[in-house]
C-alpha cells in the first residue's frame, strides 16, 4: 500500500549513502622492477639470465621517464648489475654489457657523471691485464662501452685517467685486431678531450702503441698511426723514440697506410709544439712520398708541402733574412716539382731526396 500522501519513500537527499572506500596509494614504480633486480644476485644462472632479459625488455618503457630510470639505476640496479661483469656464464656477461651500455646512454648527464666512480673501475678492470675478459668479442664490447663513456664524459674523466691509461695499454696489446683499433680510437678521443692532462702518460702510451704500428693488418697500422700522432701533438719529446716506427709507416707496403702517413706527418709539421726543432726528422718522410709509386700519394705529398710552405711563410716575419736550413731547402725543392714535366720532376725529386738526407744528417 502507498503511504498517506502518496510518497514512495524518503526524499533522495535524506537517503544514507554508503562511504566510498579510499583509493589505494599509487605503487612505487621502482617496486615493479625490484624482483628482477633481486634475481640478478640469485645463485642460479638461468634466473640471472631471465632477470637480465626482462630488465632489458623493460628499458623501452623506462626510457621515457628519466627520473624513474635514474632512481632505479642509482638505488637498486647499479651495484648488482656491475657485479655481473664477472659472471661465470659468458651469455650473462654479454647481456650485462649490453644492458649497461643502454642504461648509460639513456641516463641524464648528472647521474651518468656520478656513476663514473663505479662504472669505470669495473669496465677498465675487465679490459686490463689482471682480470681481463676471456672472450675477445666481449672485450671488444667492453672497449666500445669505454669509448662511449669517454665521448660523453669530457673533462670529468681526468680523475680516472690512470685506470684508463692502463686499459688502453692492454687494448693496444690485445691479440684481437678489432680491439686494437677501438683502443686507438679511444686514445685519439682522450687526447682531444683531456689535452691538458694526458701529457704525463704520453711516453708510456707511445711505447705500448709501438708494436701496433707494425701489425700485420693494414687497418690496425693506420689506426695506430692516427693514435701516435695524437700523442705526439700533446708531447713531442717522445718523437726521437718513435722515429724508426714512423719511418716504417712512411714506407709501408700498403698504399692506404702510406697515404695515412702523409696526412699524419703533415699534421705534425703544421701543428706540433716546437715543430721547427723536429722538422728535420719528419720532413724526409714527406719528401720520400714525392716519388711514391701511387700517383695520388705523390700529389698529396706535393700539396702538403705547398700548404706547409704557406704556414711557414705566414709564421716568418718578412724582414727576417737568414740562410735557408737544409730541411727548408728540401721543402722548397720538393714543392717546385709540382708543375714540372715527368722527367725533370724525377730529377728534381732526386735533388729533394738528397737535400732530405742532408737535413736528416743535420738532425743527427
Image: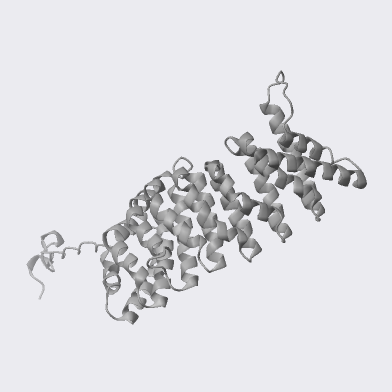
Instruction: From the viewer's perspective, tell me whether residue 288 is left or right of residue 236.
Output: right
Q: Would you say residue 108 is visible in this rendering? A: no
Q: Is residue 165 visible?
A: yes
Count of picture labels: 0
- In the rendered image, the residue lying farthest to the top is 319
Quarter of the rendering occupied by the N terminus: bottom left
Residue 213: horizontal and vertical position, in percent? 60, 58
Q: Give coordinates of residue 352: x percent, y percent.
A: 80, 41
Quadrant showing the C terminus: top right
Determine the image quadrant of residue 30.
bottom left
The residue that appears at 44% across and 59% down in the rendered structure is 167
Judging depth in this view, the residue of 213 and 100 nearest the camera is 213
> Which is more toward the observer, 243 or 266?
243
Residue sitting at x 46%, y 70% = 138
Q: Position of residue 358 (x, y in %)?
A: 74, 40
315 to 14, vertically: above or below = above
Task: Tell me the colour scheme of the image.
Answer: one colour
Relative horizontal placement of residue 297, taking residue 108 as reference (left or right): right
- What residue is shown at x 88% (from left), y 44% (from top)? 347
Residue farthest along the left direction in this orientation: 4
Above or below for 3 versus 181? below
Query: x, y (%) of residue 120?
Result: 38, 57
Amino acid at each position: 500500500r502507498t503511504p498517506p500522501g502518496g510518497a514512495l519513500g524518503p526524499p533522495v537527499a535524506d537517503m544514507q549513502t554508503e562511504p566510498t572506500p579510499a583509493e589505494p596509494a599509487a605503487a612505487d614504480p621502482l617496486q615493479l622492477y625490484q624482483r628482477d633486480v633481486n634475481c640478478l644476485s640469485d645463485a642460479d644462472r638461468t634466473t640471472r639470465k631471465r632477470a637480465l632479459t626482462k630488465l632489458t625488455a623493460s628499458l623501452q618503457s623506462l626510457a621515457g621517464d628519466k627520473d624513474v630510470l635514474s632512481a632505479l639505476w642509482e638505488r637498486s640496479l647499479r651495484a648488482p648489475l656491475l657485479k655481473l661483469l664477472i659472471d661465470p656464464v659468458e651469455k650473462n656477461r654479454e647481456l650485462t654489457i649490453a644492458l649497461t651500455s643502454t642504461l648509460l646512454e639513456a641516463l641524464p648527464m648528472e647521474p651518468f657523471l656520478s656513476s663514473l666512480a663505479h662504472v669505470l673501475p669495473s669496465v677498465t678492470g675487465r679490459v686490463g691485464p689482471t682480470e681481463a675478459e676471456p672472450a675477445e668479442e666481449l672485450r671488444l664490447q667492453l672497449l666500445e662501452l669505454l669509448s662511449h663513456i669517454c665521448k660523453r664524459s669530457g673533462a670529468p674523466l681526468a680523475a680516472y685517467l690512470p685506470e684508463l691509461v692502463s686499459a688502453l695499454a692492454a687494448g693496444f696489446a690485445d691479440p684481437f685486431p678489432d680491439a686494437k683499433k677501438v683502443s686507438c680510437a679511444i686514445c685519439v678521443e682522450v687526447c682531444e678531450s683531456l689535452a691538458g692532462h694526458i701529457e704525463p702518460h704520453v711516453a708510456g702510451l707511445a711505447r705500448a702503441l709501438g708494436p701496433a704500428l707494425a701489425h700485420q693488418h693494414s687497418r690496425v697500422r693506420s689506426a695506430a698511426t692516427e693514435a701516435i700522432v695524437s700523442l705526439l701533438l700533446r708531447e713531442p719529446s717522445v718523437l726521437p723514440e718513435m722515429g724508426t716506427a714512423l719511418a716504417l709507416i712512411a714506407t709501408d707496403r700498403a698504399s692506404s697506410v702510406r697515404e695515412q702517413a702523409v696526412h699524419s706527418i703533415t699534421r705534425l709539421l703544421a701543428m706540433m709544439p716546437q715543430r721547427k726543432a723536429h722538422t728535420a726528422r719528419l720532413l724526409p718522410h714527406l719528401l720520400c712520398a714525392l716519388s711514391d709509386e701511387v700517383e695520388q700519394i705523390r700529389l698529396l705529398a706535393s700539396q702538403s708541402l705547398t700548404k706547409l710552405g704557406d704556414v711557414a711563410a705566414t709564421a716568418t716575419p718578412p724582414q727576417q733574412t737568414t740562410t735557408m736550413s737544409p730541411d727548408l731547402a728540401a721543402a722548397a725543392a720538393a714543392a717546385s716539382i709540382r708543375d714540372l714535366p715527368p722527367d725533370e720532376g724525377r730529377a728534381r725529386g732526386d735533388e729533394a731526396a738528397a737535400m732530405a738526407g742532408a737535413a736528416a744528417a743535420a738532425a743527427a
